Amino acid sequence: MAATIYDCSDPASLLDGVRAARTAIAAGQCIVMPTDTVYGIAADAFSHSAVAGLLAAKGRDRGFPPPVLVADRHMATALAESVPAAIEPLLDAHWPGPLTVILRAQPSLTWDLGDTGGTVAIRVPDHPIAIGLLRETGPLAVSSANLHGMPAPTEAAAAAEMLGDHVAAVLDAGAVGGSAAPGEQNGSTILDCSTEGVVRIVRQGVLPRETVAAALGELLAPE
């Protein structure tokens, strides 16, 4: 059955949509939600079956663990073993924003995001609907709402067309994100900060390498 699409520009529909999304997440189902970069497919990060459903919906396996979106820095620090002091200026400037950081995961957490090697990719999205939902649900496993190999959608209709049968609700907040530079992705820039003494860009997104380099200096690995 196709997912219900909620028009978030209408206050009543937004209220109904967030309620439906929250209920779906609690039931272990997936939803489509807006972020500041692209639309994402989201599931309870602490539900093994929900995360497996997210990966299956995209046509991906455990080798592609989804990032985890959180509402704020406090929620992020609860998921990571530690946050390197060297990246704090980047987080100050770009959280919320299009920056995902891979950190060593808190070993006490009982979750299964896939083959993570003991790490977790964390982001605070810069979108009010996403932040509001995350404050209610807690951390969500979120990946771009597209089938594997297809472009990440910046409109809810495209996400619903690809994933509608696999999600319980679609929160439509209109067009999100912007145009990426040639050869780059519309999504967030992902930094691997899990190895002491070096930071690597593992996906170049809308946050430019020059911005990252200005903050990290020699800590950033060469291209």
Image: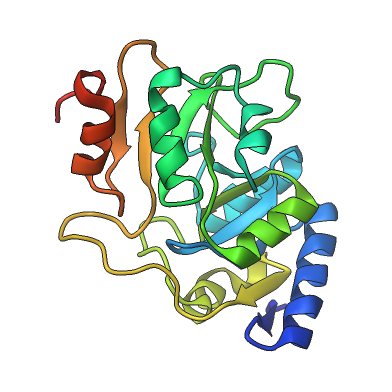
Residue 75 pos. (x, y %): 68, 37
In this rendering, the answer to whether 199 lies above or below 203 is above
Could you tell me which residue is drawn at 40 percent across and 32 percent down? Answer: 89
For residue 80, which quarter of the picture? top right
**Which quadrant is the N terminus positioned in?**
bottom right
Image coordinates for residue 66, horizontal then vertical, percent: 54, 42
Mark yes or no: residue 30 visible: no
Residue pushed farthest top? 196
Horizontal side, residue 87 vs residue 208: left or right = right
Left or right, 46 with respect to 149, comes to: right
What percent of the width, then of the height, locates residue 51?
66, 44
Between 183 and 50, the residue placed more toward the observer is 183
Residue at x 51%, y 81% (from the top left corner)? 174
Way the structure is coloured: rainbow
Quadrant occupied by the C terminus: top left
Q: Is residue 21 above or below residue 15?
A: above
Compared to 93, does 37 lie above or below?
below
Q: How many marks overall? A: 0
Q: Nearer the viewer, residue 30 or 107?
A: 107
Q: Nearer the viewer, residue 94 or 30?
A: 94
Q: Residue at x 64, y 57 (%)?
A: 131
Using residue 160 as the reference point, say whether residue 90 is left or right of it: left
Q: Residue at x 52, y 22 (%)?
A: 83
Examine the rendering and report whether any part of residue 132 can be seen: yes
Residue 177 in the figure: left or right of residue 156: left
Q: Position of residue 138 (x, y in %)?
A: 75, 46
In-front residue for pair 46/215:
215
